[in-house]
Image (cartoon, rainbow, N blue to C red):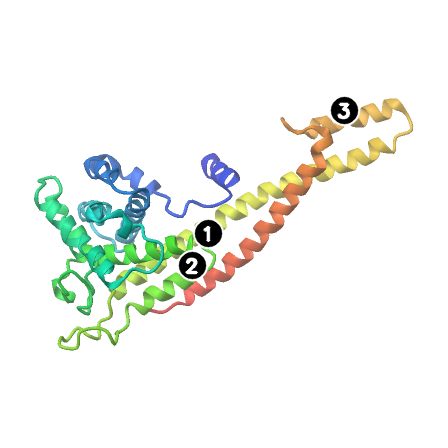
């Protein structure tokens, strides 16, 4: 593990669920600066959601082996997919609790509102498919037009899956990949025929989501979970080394305290200081020691859960 990843775990105690390192490495942020500025007009939750969906979209495109140019296009569409929400009244957008049918109809207009905004801006117009189509479903049950599979742009099919995944993850406030298989199961269900789908088309048995894209989402999550496991194991190795250090200190303290002579007491006291790090006062060492032990035990439990979780994820079928 490099120093950056170690410090990220040590300080935050969690893995960044939406690590956008790949986006930065591909220099995408600089190519879509204009679109990113527009996100500042959205509320904090919607802005964060838009960034998350863009990151997931990028990872899906990589798994789908899509060309670099098309990937950049998809990511830009994803960044602005909810741009129309800036026109939705905050009391509806930020409502706590279930929406009424009337309020839901208002929310649904963010697709056409975003599309209309794109049509009036030459820099946004090429990416209008993101706002317009990301809630269309393959079986015709989506909105705003109720399109079926052949009429829904592929970029929108990708963004739809990314959007659903982030909505579930955010709603459940995941800080780790533990139990994330529950969210994947819901998305897998959306690849299956729905009784609510329009029955007057040959696509009523398609399901809402593209199966191949959902399969790639599972691979993305497997990669992320393996990465979290790897980082956690590295962090636990660090904790083990620290625990060994404190075990040595504990041994020296016992020898010091059992010393009969002042010179022996002083010898062990000085020896102890060689094992102490900055800001570790001798009188606090057992408190620090217990913190390391408790953290290690907690991480060990999480690691076991992650190993179990990845088994479940790998067993999922689309």
Q: Neighbour class for label 2 at 10 Å: few (<14), some, many (≥20)?
A: many
Residue bearing mark 3: 270
- Can you identify the residue that label 1 sits on? 176
Residue displayed at 22% across by 61% down: 102
The C terminus appears in which quarter of the rendering?
Answer: bottom left
- In this orientation, does residue 141 appear? yes
Residue contact at pointers 1 and 2, CB within 8 angstroms: yes
Q: Position of residue 59 (x, y in %)?
A: 30, 50
Tell which tag, 3 or 1, sits nearer the viewer. 1
How far apart in space, not on screen, are marks 3 and 1 (Cα)?
A: 42 Å
Q: CA distance from mark 2 to mark 3?
A: 50 Å
Of 35 and 314, nearer the camera is 35
- Depth check: 209 or 316 in front? 209
Identify the residue at horizontal 47%, vertical 61% (top origin): 309
- The residue indicated by pointer 2 is 180
In the image, is 224 to the left or to the right of 70?
right
In contact (CB < 8 Å): disc 3 and disc 1: no
Q: Is residue 57 above or below residue 179?
A: above
Of tags 2 and 3, the one toward the viewer is 2
Residue 71 shows up from this direction: no
| Percent of width and height locating residue 290 | 68, 42
- State the SS at label 3: helix
Q: Nearer the viewer, residue 277 or 192?
A: 192
- Residue 271 falls in image quadrant: top right
């Amino acid at each position: 593990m490099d120093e950056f990843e170690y410090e990220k775990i040590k300080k935050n105690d969690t893995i960044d669920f939406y690590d956008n390192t790949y986006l930065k490495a591909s220099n995408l942020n600089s190519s879509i600066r204009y679109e990113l500025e527009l996100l500042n007009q959205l509320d904090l939750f919607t802005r964060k959601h838009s960034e998350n969906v863009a990151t997931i979209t990028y990872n899906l495109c990589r798994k789908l082996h899509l060309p670099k140019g098309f990937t950049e296009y998809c990511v830009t569409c994803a960044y602005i997919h909810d741009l129309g929400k800036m026109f939705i009244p905050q009391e509806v957008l930020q409502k706590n609790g279930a929406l009424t049918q009337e309020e839901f109809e208002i929310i649904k207009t963010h697709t056409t509102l975003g599309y209309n905004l794109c049509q009036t801006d030459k820099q946004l117009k090429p990416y209008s498919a993101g706002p317009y189509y990301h809630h269309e479903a393959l079986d015709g049950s989506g909105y705003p037009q109720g399109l079926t599979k052949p009429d829904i742009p592929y970029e929108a099919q990708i963004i739809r899956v990314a959007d659903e995944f982030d909505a579930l993850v955010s709603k459940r406030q995941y800080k780790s990949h533990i139990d994330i298989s529950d969210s994947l199961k819901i998305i897998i269900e959306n690849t299956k025929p729905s009784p609510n789908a329009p029955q007057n088309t040959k696509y009523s048995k398609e399901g809402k989501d593209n199966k191949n894209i959902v399969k790639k989402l599972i691979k993305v999550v497997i990669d992320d979970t393996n990465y979290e496991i790897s980082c956690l194991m590295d962090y636990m190795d660090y904790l083990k080394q620290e625990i060994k250090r404190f075990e040595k200190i504990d041994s020296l303290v016992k020898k010091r305290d059992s010393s009969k002579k002042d010179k022996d007491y002083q010898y062990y006291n000085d020896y102890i200081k060689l094992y102490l790090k900055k800001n570790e006062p001798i009188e606090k060492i057992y408190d620090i020691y217990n913190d390391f032990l408790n953290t290690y035990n907690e991480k060990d439990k999480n690691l076991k859960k992650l190993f179990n979780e990845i088994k479940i994820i790998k067993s999922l079928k689309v």
